[in-house]
Image (cartoon, coloured by chain):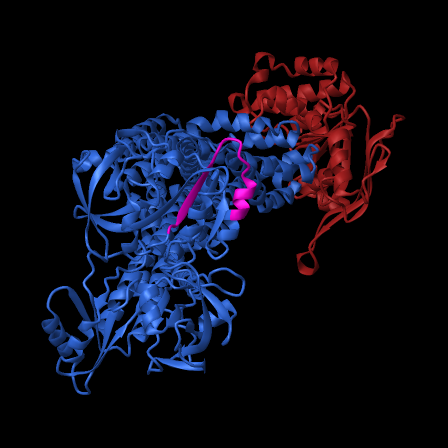
Chain colours: A red, B blue
Amino acid sequence: MTTRTTAPAAVSAQDLWKVYGHGEARVVALRGVSATFARHTFTAIMGPSGSGKSTLMHCLAGLDTPTRGEVRIGDTSLAGLSDAALTRMRRERIGFIFQQFNLLPTLTASENIRLPLTIAGRRPDPDWFRRLIATVGLGDRLHHRPTQLSGGQQQRVACARALITRPDVVFADEPTGNLDSRSGREILRFLRTSVHEHGQTIVMVTHDPVAASYADRVVFLADGEIVDELTHPTAEAVLDTMKRLDTGAVVEVA
Amino acid sequence: MLRVTLKGMAQRKVRMLLSTLAVLLGVAFVSGALVLTDTLGRSFDRVFSDAYAYIDVRVSGEPVFEVDELEGPPALTPVPDDIVARVAAVPGVAEAIGVVDVEGARLIGADGKTVPTFGPPQLGTNWLGETELVQLREGRGPQAPDEIAINAGLADAAQVGVGDRVGVLTREPRQEFTVVGIFEYAGGRESIGGAQEVSFTDATAQRLMLGETGMWSAVRVTAESGVDPQRLRDDVAAVLGDGYQVHTGEELAEKYATGLKEGLRFFTYILLGFAAVALFVGVFLILNTFSIVVAQRLRELALLRALGAGRRQVIASVLSEAVVIGVLASVLGLAAGIGVGALLAAAATSFMSLPLAGLGVPVTAVVSAFVTGLLVTLVAAVLPALRASRIPPVAAMQEAATPDRPLTRITVAGAVLLAGGVGLLGAGLVTDTLWQLLVGVLATFAAVALLTPMVARPVVNAVGRLFSWSVAGTLGRLNAGRNPRRTAITAAALMVGVALVSGVNVILQSAKVSLDDAVREAVDADLMVLGDMSGATLPTFDVRALERAADLPGVVATTALYQDLALVNGERTYVTATSDFTGLARIHRPSLVAGELERLGPDQLAISDHIAERHGLAIGDPVTVQFNRGEPHQLTVGAVYEDGSFPGRWMLPAGVTPDMTQPQPFMGAVLLADGAPVEPVREQLEAWLADSPEVTVTDLSGFIAQQAALMDMVLRMVQLLLALAIIIAVLGIVNTLALSVLERTREIGMLRAVGLTRSAITRMVTVESVVISVFGALLGIVVGSALGAAVVNALAEEGVEQLALPWASFGIYLALSAAVGVVAAVLPAIRAARTNVLAAIAHE
């Protein structure tokens, strides 16, 4: 990797391979990916469909196990952790934002935000909770149920839920995929704010160049390998890189 | 269209299987009941045709009135000795023999107790020597008055052999005999259908079984060879004229078998009751399954509609699924029913030591299996099918959002139905009309099921609070309240069973408490002499023990009670006789309306005011009491008491007892002076009753417990129903949970992703299940208590004056339902815990 920061890495991957199936049906999703995601940074992972970006994120987040290679969250290696240990790791040190929001329809917005803490049996830090709520900007809708909220509002609740535990890293899987562009921009601004003002670390998978342009750094994946990266990207630069990858990625990598 | 349906069903195997199982259970009970009745019926046929195979014609006295199988030993009207000679003189008669063949010879076995039978008779007979039917296996026939021969089956059960001295209870108290012979029946059988037979000499048999010499219970006629028994029957009847019954052996076999088969109906009704509950609960389960299936197939059905399928085709598609399930359930249910019937028949026959005839599957069993199976399934599927047909084609294009439909309509429908059901129930209770009661109860259940969604949310919430100490518990509680209709119908299945049992329990508990109060208020006795029935005859004891006890220090009063059927002023009814009206009055403290008990003469009787009013009787009016034997007794009314303050409604003087079927008392009571020690009297009485092994000496609570024993038995039987209803309810809960888990895959994945452990997921599903089942049990207890209270209210006039709620049983039902919830949750919870996080959260 070309980018080095003095701050210790929040997440790092070392020579990750992920292979599905055997023989004829064998599919290699990741081919020796190594990457480091520094603390207090906002990274976007991009790539055409089938490039392995979702697989990479799942492996980084401990949801999927790589065939070979190692993932570390902070100092902890995920290799060989039991399901219970992985569950605890997700509960305490990792946050998730999904494309489908995935809120519990039975809980109010406020209860949904506090859910990870409730699961862990902890009380929210009132200061952080207030700041988070203020940033999310739900105002009087905090006690409404998800079905009474717009998509954008639901996703903001989901973001707050991911951040409530102040995790080492938040993984966002196409967080704007189900939103109109205005709501999407709000979410992206919110994510950037939480990195730059509240010191969070975010890794986001997206295929939208505009979304990627909100990140500090964009990593490009094609055919299971990291093929490029941009720092302080603009939407145009990202789009250019993508076009280049679409047309000549294979040749270039080979 | 059918192929599409079948393919769809194949993909929902488990859910279809659960529904099928529910119907299957019901069908199994229906066909099982019919198979059982048929098989047992033919077993009885065979027993009686064996017993009467060697009789051409039999002559017996015309009874005053017939006695049913369930009422006691068959009516007995002895025939005098000279009839035998008259019959013998009829042309065509080869031989006419006077026989004694009477129910009520109870042999005391090696263990000091009478050898019980559960149904078959305990016959006392006269020894006729070896015949085609009876052959000695060991020893000889009785020749002296204190000698008997017994059948091999009885010898086995009593563990006595030739040469042993044994006691036998008859019309007389215990008498000692020497067993001189043990016999068997044609074909080397030890017993005919489990019957016990004690053979005395002629005179002893007459004295002990008939109570008089020179009489027979019947004349057995053998026809000359070549003479048709039916011709002979007519000839004999013509010679004897009125007052005698003349039957061929075949007719007798048929008559007695028919009588017993009538008694068998009881079994059938119980099993059919089980079947009704199983099917009724099954309807809920199927309704739920099909609603779920329709909801899941929403897009598919809309697509079919968009592709041009008509409404009718959609209905047909859903109903054809129902037909497949119905047929499957009927076939399997019939098979299971044959198994159940065979098993029960084998159990029943071995219990009654009856030889089992071959298994019979009557056509009615097959037909009713298919009719009930199909009908129930189709009825349950109609509503979901109609709903399916209303799915607009455009739903295929929309996001599958099924908004909560408002509950107003079904709530209103439920309220209307409830009003109707309760009204019908009330009317039924007032007029004692069975169909009104049944339809009323069914309508009430259905109405409550319709109203359940309304109360589901608040109640489920309240119940769930118990589990809210953990996240998993909170989530489970919220999930249970999510789909009130589904929760309601699932809980309703359990509600029905619990309500039935709770209702019966409330009634019985109230009856018991009322009985306890009534007995303690009405009876003032320190010791009671009573026993349990060991055969068709009431337990009896030697009245002399009680007479002697009257002279013991401290004893204030004693009384012995006798019971029989009699014609009283031409009406057949049970009557009670007492050894001592004065003693009876001290012990029972009746509220007298007219007359004085102490002054009753030997030809006077006492009646309840209820009877007095119904028959228009007053002090001094004549009453004719005719037992099945002996002359009519002319009595006059000497006292009238308040109904219920005496053990019977017709209380007769001791003088009538020799004409009773059992001239020995079945119950006795002893009252001691205040402060007199009870134990010495008890011990002395027990010693004097040593020869009456059928009874024990107890106190009032023993008497109450004996009276309540029948209620406890009914309750146990009804609780079996609960077990059955629970099994079906479990299927329903599994069904609902499995579906919920499937629908919430994404949610569960998210919960796992944000850190909920597998075991917490398991707990979450378990709590949802427990909340639903406890909700169902709560509903059942409330509905059952209400129904029970209504019945108790209606029974107030019959002496059930107190409403008592069996809280302990309610607690057990709730605990049981919670356990059921845990069991039902096992599979769905495992499935939920195994949810693949990645697959769950990955977007399509």
Q: Position of residue B780 (x, y in %)?
A: 44, 35
Q: Nearer the viewer, residue A182 or B420?
A: B420
Asked if residue A136 shows in the view, the reply is yes
Query: Looking at the figure, which quarter contains the N terminus of chain A?
Result: top right
The span shown in magenta is: B665-684
Residue A100 or residue A4, whichever sits in front: A100
Q: Is residue A174 visible?
A: no
Toward the bottom, the furthest residue is B225
Q: Is residue A126 left or right of residue B638?
A: right
Q: Where's residue B293, x and y in %?
A: 43, 44
Residue B666 highlighted magenta (yes or no): yes
Task: Give the quarter of the image for residue B649.
Answer: top left
**Of the pair A15 and A162, the residue shown nearer to us:** A162
Query: Does B370 sit above or below residue B245?
Result: above
Image coordinates for residue A156, horizontal then vertical, percent: 63, 21
Determine the residue located farthest toward the right in the rendered image: A6
B650 sits left or right of A180 in the view? left
Residue B577 in percent (x, y) is at 31, 46
How many numbered markers are drawn? Answer: 0
Residue B576, image quadrant = top left
Q: Is residue B514 magenta?
A: no
